Image (cartoon, rainbow, N blue to C red):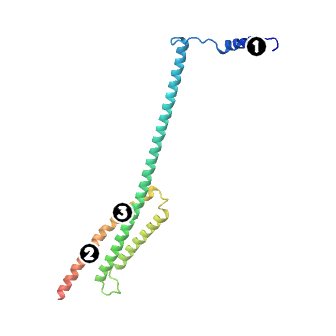
Amino acid sequence: MVGINTLEVNRLDDTARGSHAFAPMHAFRADSPLAAAGGADARQGERGRVFSFAYYALAAVVALAVGVCAWVVRHQRVRRRHGALQSLMDNADRLEADLKDCRDRLQRAHAVMSVSPDVPAAGEVEAQHAVDSDLRALLRQRLWIRDRGADASQRELDDAVAALVRARHQLEPRLRALDDAQAALDTAVREHIHKDF
């Protein structure tokens, strides 16, 4: 920059920069239309953010409620299934104990009534076959529980439990009748023994 005064260049440079860099700012008034439009936009944006947050919070609460309901339903099904399997095993054990008790009582009763230990008493064979048949049916039920119990539907489990309960209820009057017959037999034997003496 030959021939130009450096002070002049600096002044010109400051003037050029100042006119563009430091433009006067207009005064902001709160009641101006520009302020009202800007405020409405700000309020609208804030409402949108609040609505968006509320929408997402509601969606999260609904999703959580659905998840909890699904867990409760599944948990109840698992508990019901476990209860049915447990009831099935318990009823099978009780029925087996009742059948073995019945068999033992029959053997004792027939031992008293038999004339000879080698000759079965009247009805002993049929009674023994009936008890053995019930024990075989129970064994089949236990095998079903072992093989298919884990994969069985809830209805199949409930039906199996109901069948075992029915079998036990049907056996109870027979056990009572056997008790009555045993008591009558014991009384008759005692009376026979007293007559002989």
Find disc 3 in the rendering and name its residue.
Answer: 166
Q: Earlier in the sequence, mark 1 or mark 2?
A: 1
Residue at x-position 43% and y-position 59%: 157
- Circle 2: element type: helix
Residue type at mark 3 is: Arg
Residue 146: give x, y in percent of width and height.
47, 65
Find disc 2 in the rendering and name its residue.
Answer: 181
Residue at x-position 19% and y-position 82%: 191
Residue at x-position 41% and y-position 54%: 80
Left or right: residue 18 versus residue 82 is right
- Give residue 6's mark: 1
Quadrant where the N terminus is found in the figure = top right
Q: Are marks 1 and 2 in contact (CB under 8 Å)?
A: no
Residue 136: give x, y in percent of width and height.
43, 71
Up/down of 98 relative to 123, above or below: above
Up/down of 122 relative to 47, above or below: below
Residue at x-position 37% and y-position 77%: 128
Residue 172: give x, y in percent of width and height.
31, 67
Q: Are marks 2 and 3 in contact (CB under 8 Å)?
A: no
Mark in the foreground, 1 or 3: 1
| Residue closest to the far bottom | 197
Residue type at mark 2 is: Ala
Residue type at mark 1 is: Thr
Residue 61: give x, y in percent of width and height.
46, 38
- Circle 1: element type: helix
